[in-house]
Image: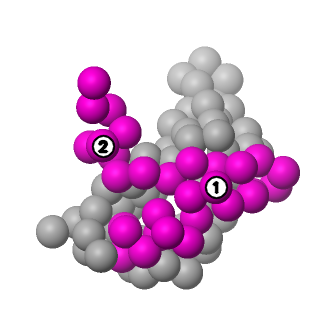
Amino acid sequence: MNGKLFICNLPRSMTEGELISLFTQAGEVILVDLIKDRFNGESKGFAFVTMGSRSEAERAILKFNAHIVKTHQITVAMAEQAFQL
């Protein structure tokens, strides 16, 4: 079972390649979906990262939640938990 993560408060200059490099430190990265503005193509400051397994996703949360990336303190959570009411 894959672990899909929601990452927010990313620097707008962050690229998909940089996200892959960062999250590969916690395990296999299957997919990165950096959300961009459809009009200007700039990052909106959040992304979804799908890890190879749920345990790798949990490792990424422990390693990178509240991690500083280019002066921004990012938040990393399981995607399904991030959107619960």
Q: Is residue 11 visible?
A: yes
Tell me: residue 75, above or below residue 56.
above
The numbered disc on residue 66 is 1
Residue 52, image x, y percentages: 30, 74
Tell me: residue 62, above or below residue 34.
below
Q: Residue 3 appears in which quarter of the rendering? A: bottom left
Q: Nearer the viewer, residue 59 or 45?
A: 59
Is the residue under label 2 in contact with that under label 1 (CB below 8 Å)? no
Name the residue located 51 percent from the left edge and 48 percent from the top edge.
7
Name the residue located 36 percent from the left edge and 76 percent from the top edge.
56
Magenta span contains residue 13 = no
Residue 17, image x, y percentages: 61, 64
Q: Amino acid at mark 1?
A: Ala
Magenta span contains residue 62 = yes
Q: Amino acid at mark 2?
A: Gln
The numbered disc on residue 81 is 2
